[in-house]
Amino acid sequence: MNRITLAKKLGIVLLSFGIVFSAYSPAVPAQAMQASLQLRAAGQTDQSLQITMKTYKHSYKTKEGKIYKKISYEYPVASGDSEAASTFNAFYQKQKKNWLKQAKSDLATAKEEIASFNKDDNRHYSDEVTCKISSTDETYLSILQTGYSNTLGAHGLPYRISYIFDVSTGEPVSPETILGLTTEQLNKKVVKLYLKKYDAQKDTNDMPFFKRKVVRETAEKMNFSQNCYIKNNSLRFYADPYSLGPYASGFIEVSLKFR
């Protein structure tokens, strides 16, 4: 389920407008946030991927100086001159560009709405992404980004962006490849895990789901290859808020041990 569909369920209207970025003040340069760790590709002791988190930030303001949207995007950068590092960095530069395009799609709406507020009302739109390494070893590097978009509705919209990488190449790798399954086989396996979790929590105070039929029918239409990260030697699959359960349930996860 994409972010726009979720936003409609929240009662938030997201409109796309063609905004020319150069019409606004220059963005704040990306700032290094923290050095995380150093990875060594299996069998290649002379090469490594050193991952540093950087953050791009920008505030959009009216002519009067009133902020109408803030954006923040934290993302990983690999240092070094290896081919794997170059491949990894090129991937996230593209991801950053795509995210910025999405984040700027409602600037006109935000500017118009904020302009109608009185001068003491400091509310504004925002979209913020944080990033962490959920798992790493000599084979795989798992990156999990968590976003939160606020368009002044009843509450904001949380979302995730996750990818798993082959450390030796810097290329993204799918959970199907890791498990040796087709996408259809993977999705069927994950649906069974969700139904098993549903049955185990049925009639308990921890029940996070909608009705079982809704969970099954919705999960069968999802592509869990795109909603997956590694943690504790397990592939963790997640469903976005509102897809399989109410907003308060957050991201509902199931896990599959692969080692």
Image (cartoon, rainbow, N blue to C red):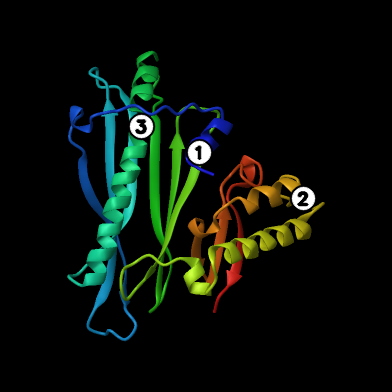
- Does 56 sit above or below residue 36? above
The spot of residue 183 in percent (x, y) is: 54, 63
Q: Which residue is mark 2?
A: 205
Q: Is residue 216 left or right of residue 136?
A: right
Residue under pointer 1: 157
Badge 2 crowding class, 10 Å Cα cut-off, few under 14, some 14 to 19, many 20 or more, is few
Q: Secondary structure at mark 3?
A: loop
**Cα–Cα gap, marks 1 and 3:** 15 Å
What is the secondary structure assignment of the residue under circle 1?
strand
Mark 1, mark 2: which one is toward the viewer? 1
Label 3 belongs to which residue?
A: 105
Above-or-below relation of 97 to 91 = above
The x, y position of residue 254, in whole percent, is 62, 61
Which one is nearer the viewer's eye here, 2 or 154?
2
| CB under 8 Å between discs 1 and 3 | no
Instruction: Please report contact status of discs 1 and 2: CB closer than 8 Å, yes or no.
Output: no
